[in-house]
């Protein structure tokens, strides 16, 4: 959708999908099952002269009914990003990026419903990056930022006291009483790479949206690069009926997952979804 003098362009898609879900080491909580989920992706792009401004909002929430065990979730996502670029030379832009990532509801490692492993704004990731952006066309962009500040905020004090997501954990007296609460904020400084590609094929029937983010914290274990990858394919049989495939891969050295032997260690998180449902692309 183009507005006015075509400097602004608005696009997106909304979907309601019934799916089969397979999860592995997923911090937000969940398990394999038949399920349903709702998603909304919005993009607002501005391009005029040497200025380019791109803003996206990506939200999703999915629930599963497991017999008499009640509702559990398998998808919980809120991502906002806004990037401004000023053309430096041909397809290269001086750029600044601001982004926020979090979730809407508590997450558990089912069947345990007593102890949360994530929560609303726990974590909340805020990123401010300065660097160069390569944009050869309207579909692809590659941002390289050697100067990136990242904030990790943990609102849930129980998780903060446990040192979840890398924040400094609580201190305890020898008798087991609390001496000092854990910190709620972790500040990081490092390098950031973000690659994005959006396009449609087959006369608009097949949509592709993919994104890769890499972050290295200069101040602590810079070789342990955090990875966040998303892939979404949607094929429209009709204007409303669609088939959707989603894949998400996450690795974060500060996300410790309890293993079968009781030890806490980082693991590759994998979420895959394939389903059929209703969708509207604009």
Image (cartoon, helix red, strand yellow):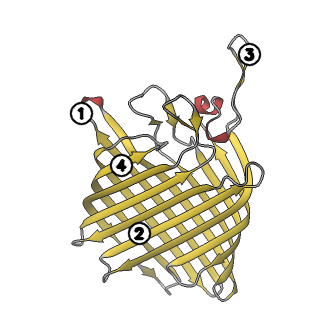
**Which residue is disc 3 drawn over?**
173
**Which residue is disc 1 drawn over?**
67
Residue occupying image coordinates x 24% and y 67%: 240
Q: Nearer the viewer, mark 4 or mark 2?
A: 4
Q: Nearer the viewer, mark 2 or mark 1?
A: 1
Task: Say if mark 1 contacts mark 3, CB within 8 Å.
Answer: no
Q: In the rendered view, would you say 281 is above or below 188?
A: below
Task: State the image coordinates of residue 231 (x, y, percent, origin top left).
Answer: 44, 64
- Of marks 1 and 3, which one's residue comes earlier in the chain? 1
**Which residue is disc 2 drawn over?**
12
Q: Nearer the viewer, mark 4 or mark 1?
A: 4
Task: State the image coordinates of residue 135 (x, y, percent, origin top left).
Answer: 59, 81
* Label 4: few (<14), some (14–19) or many (≥20) C-alpha neighbours in 10 Å: some
Tell me the element at label 4.
strand
Q: Disc 1 to disc 3, how far (Cα)?
A: 44 Å
- Of marks 2 and 1, which one's residue comes earlier in the chain? 2
Q: How many marks?
A: 4
Q: Disc 2 to disc 3, how far (Cα)?
A: 53 Å
Task: Say if mark 2 contacts mark 1, CB within 8 Å.
Answer: no
- Of marks 4 and 1, which one's residue comes earlier in the chain? 4
Residue occupying image coordinates x 73% and y 58%: 190
Task: State the image coordinates of residue 25 (x, y, percent, origin top left).
Answer: 47, 43
Tell me the element at label 1.
helix
Q: In the rendered view, would you say 105 is above or below 48?
A: above
Task: Say if mark 4 contacts mark 1, CB within 8 Å.
Answer: no
**Left or right of 65, for residue 5:** right
């Amino acid at each position: 959708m183009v507005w006015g003098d075509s400097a602004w362009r608005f696009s997106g898609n909304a979907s309601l999908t019934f799916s089969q879900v397979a999860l592995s080491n997923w911090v937000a909580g969940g398990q394999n099952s038949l399920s349903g989920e709702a998603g909304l992706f919005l993009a607002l792009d501005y391009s005029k002269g040497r200025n380019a401004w791109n803003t996206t909002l990506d939200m999703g929430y999915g629930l599963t009914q497991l017999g008499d065990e009640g509702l559990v979730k398998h998808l919980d996502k809120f991502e906002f990003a806004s990037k401004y670029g000023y053309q430096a030379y041909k397809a290269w832009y001086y750029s600044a990026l601001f982004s926020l990532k979090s979730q809407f509801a508590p997450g558990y490692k089912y069947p345990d419903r007593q102890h949360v492993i994530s929560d609303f704004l726990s974590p909340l990731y805020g990123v401010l990056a300065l660097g160069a952006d390569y944009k050869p066309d309207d579909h692809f962009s590659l941002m390289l930022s050697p100067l990136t500040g990242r904030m990790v905020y943990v609102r849930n004090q129980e998780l903060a006291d446990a040192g979840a997501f890398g924040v400094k954990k609580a201190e305890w007296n020898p008798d087991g009483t609390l001496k000092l609460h854990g910190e709620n904020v972790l500040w990081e400084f490092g390098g950031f790479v973000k690659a994005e590609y959006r396009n449609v094929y087959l006369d608009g029937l097949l949509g592709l949206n993919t994104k890769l983010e890499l972050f290295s914290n200069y101040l602590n274990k810079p070789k342990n690069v955090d990875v966040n990858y998303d892939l979404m394919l949607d094929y429209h049989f009709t204007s409303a009926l669609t088939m959707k495939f989603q894949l998400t891969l996450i690795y974060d050295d500060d996300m410790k997952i309890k293993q079968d032997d009781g030890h806490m260690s980082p693991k590759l998180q994998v979420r895959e979804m394939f389903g059929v449902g209703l969708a509207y692309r604009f």
